Image (spheres, coloured by chain):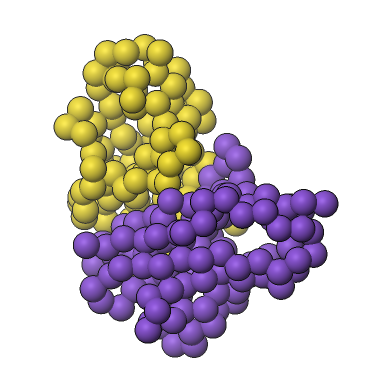
Chain colours: A yellow, B purple
Amino acid sequence: AAGVIQSPRHLIKEKRETATLKCYPIPRHDTVYWYQQGPGQDPQFLISFYEKMQSDKGSIPDRFSAQQFSDYHSELNMSSLELGDSALYFCASSLVMSGGLEQYFGPGTRLTVT
Amino acid sequence: AQSVTQPDIHITVSEGASLELRCNYSYGATPYLFWYVQSPGQGLQLLLKYFSGDTLVQGIKGFEAEFKRSQSSFNLRKPSVHWSDAAEYFCAVGASNTGKLIFGQGTTLQVKP
């Protein structure tokens, strides 16, 4: 079965640079979630989109923005990167419309800011 | 406010022994509860979920969990642990309106031979 695809899997950036993370949800899933997991931490919710509209927002810095496109893939844009942004970024998808609240996670993008 | 607490940061069990990982939640409405497992450097895999109905739910890899509303708990159990079960386990509660997950701090399971 198709899973959530995230690219790139690994990314190394310098402070103050910009990064773009991509997420391709499971086909026909209508909702995408982004989470940030710092070293030794639990995943923290950043933002979600339902049918290409932002549906919820968590502790996402103003330096970050995200959107969901017409093909349902999503991108997380991160600017003015800081050392503290180094983390594993997960994308998850679900089919909320049919009541499916369980989320299926991608493998994550490991971002290292130097 | 919604929150999830996993009281045990680290648990070590012998292979073949039984396992119980604790999870307590705080949520105003009927909770949607999940257990996820994460191997080092890997993504999160859904073990099982509770939405409603039977309070004892079965999941993959021989895991089960029991929802106890009176205790606000959703403990994960396995009768006989295998070495491959060594991983990080996260309990999570899902918001009923948007579905976002709030995770507990995680429990690291180590399995002794």
Nearest the eye: B7 or A18? B7
Task: Identify the residue at image location x=39%, y=55%.
Answer: B103
Task: Identify the residue at image location x=46%, y=79%.
Answer: B67
Task: Identify the residue at image location x=30%, y=20%.
Answer: A82
* Quadrant in which the N terminus of chain A is drawn: bottom right
Q: Position of residue A25 (x, y in %)?
A: 43, 49
Q: Is residue A95 above or below residue B10?
A: below
Q: Is residue B110 above or below residue B70?
A: above
Q: Is residue A30 left or right of residue B76?
A: left
Q: Is residue A35 left or right of residue B88?
A: left
Q: Is residue B77 above or below residue A31?
A: below
Q: Position of residue A100 (x, y in %)?
A: 40, 69
Nearest the eye: B34 or A39? A39
- Quadrant assignment, res A14: top left
- Quadrant assignment, res A99: bottom left
Q: Position of residue A40 (x, y in %)?
A: 48, 38
Q: Position of residue B29 (x, y in %)?
A: 25, 76
